[in-house]
Image: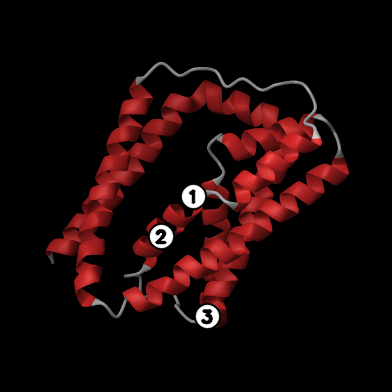
């Protein structure tokens, strides 16, 4: 049981890191904040953003317990999940074939207004709900995933820690990370697309059996 909980916590950390791994508004803003070398502002911002992940994750994943009791809804979710995985794989392949634009980072230090805007977006981020619903839909059939309130809380804490880790990397070593992504973006996109395609076929096979 303890081993299962540890695995679930580590899984949460991995999901949290993955959620902010690819450059987007929040992690690029954290990178810009890090360029200002304001350690206090960086620490405060990272803690707030990572803590926000806990209620988002916990509420969405807890809602999956109710869904697990709805057989018709579960069948719909299974097929929607397979469709979404195929769509995401398609868009990842399409993006990999496009000419990638370089990511521009402003060199000026972020002021308090920009920091508040970043925090506002992180707190009221509509993509968070959809992201955790997708992850919940993926884990819903996994027998090794425990759905007790404590294990979900542990998973949520792990996700929060994962977000804190990846954003801290962006804050203090983000420019090198951005340079790496720019140089290997096509390979990364193809790899992600391939993984999504495999997951889509696995889900399709499970739906048909």
Residue 156 placement, left or right of 167: left
Q: Where is residue 203, by image quadrant?
A: bottom left
In which quadrant of the rendered image does the C terminus lie? bottom left
Give the secondary structure at mark 2.
helix
Give the secondary structure at mark 3.
helix
Residue 66 placement, left or right of 154: left
Give the secondary structure at mark 1.
helix
- Mark 2 crowd level (few <14, some 14–19, many ≥20, 10 Å Cα): some
- Mark 1 crowd level (few <14, some 14–19, many ≥20, 10 Å Cα): few
Q: In front: 111, or 42?
A: 111
Q: Which residue is mark 1?
A: 126
Q: Is residue 30 visible?
A: yes
**Of circles 1 and 2, which is in front?**
1
Residue 151 placement, left or right of 177: left
Q: Where is residue 202, by image quadrant?
A: bottom left
Residue beneath the point at 41% across and 16% down = 99
Where residue 35 sits: x, y (%)?
78, 29
Q: Which residue is mark 3?
A: 149
- N-terminal of the pair, mark 1 or mark 2, is 1
- N-terminal of the pair, mark 3 or mark 2, is 2
Where residue 208 sits: x, y (%)?
12, 62
Question: What number is the disc on residue 133?
Answer: 2
Where residue 8 sits: x, y (%)?
52, 69
Query: Could you give the CA–CA distance between mark 3 and mark 2, rounded to whole angstroms?
Result: 17 Å
Residue beneath the point at 61% across and 27% down = 178
């Amino acid at each position: 049981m303890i081993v299962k909980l540890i695995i679930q916590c580590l899984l949460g950390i991995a999901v949290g890191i993955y959620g902010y791994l690819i450059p987007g508004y929040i992690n690029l803003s954290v990178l810009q904040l890090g360029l200002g070398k304001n350690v206090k502002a960086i620490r405060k911002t990272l803690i707030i953003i990572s803590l926000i992940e806990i209620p988002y994750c916990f509420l969405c994943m807890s809602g999956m317990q109710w869904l697990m009791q709805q057989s018709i809804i579960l069948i719909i979710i299974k097929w929607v999940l397979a469709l979404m995985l195929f769509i995401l794989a398609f868009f990842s392949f399409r993006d990999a074939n496009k000419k990638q634009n370089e990511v521009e980072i402003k060199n000026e230090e972020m002021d308090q207004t920009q920091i508040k805007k970043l925090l506002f977006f992180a707190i009221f981020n509509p993509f968070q709900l959809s992201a955790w619903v997708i992850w919940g839909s993926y884990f819903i059939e996994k027998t090794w995933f425990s759905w007790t309130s404590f294990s979900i809380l542990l998973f949520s804490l792990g996700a929060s820690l994962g977000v804190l880790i990846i954003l801290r990397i962006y804050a203090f070593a983000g420019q090198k990370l951005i340079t790496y992504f720019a140089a290997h973006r096509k390979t990364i996109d193809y790899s992600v697309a391939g993984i999504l395609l495999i997951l889509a076929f696995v889900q399709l096979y499970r739906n048909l059996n």
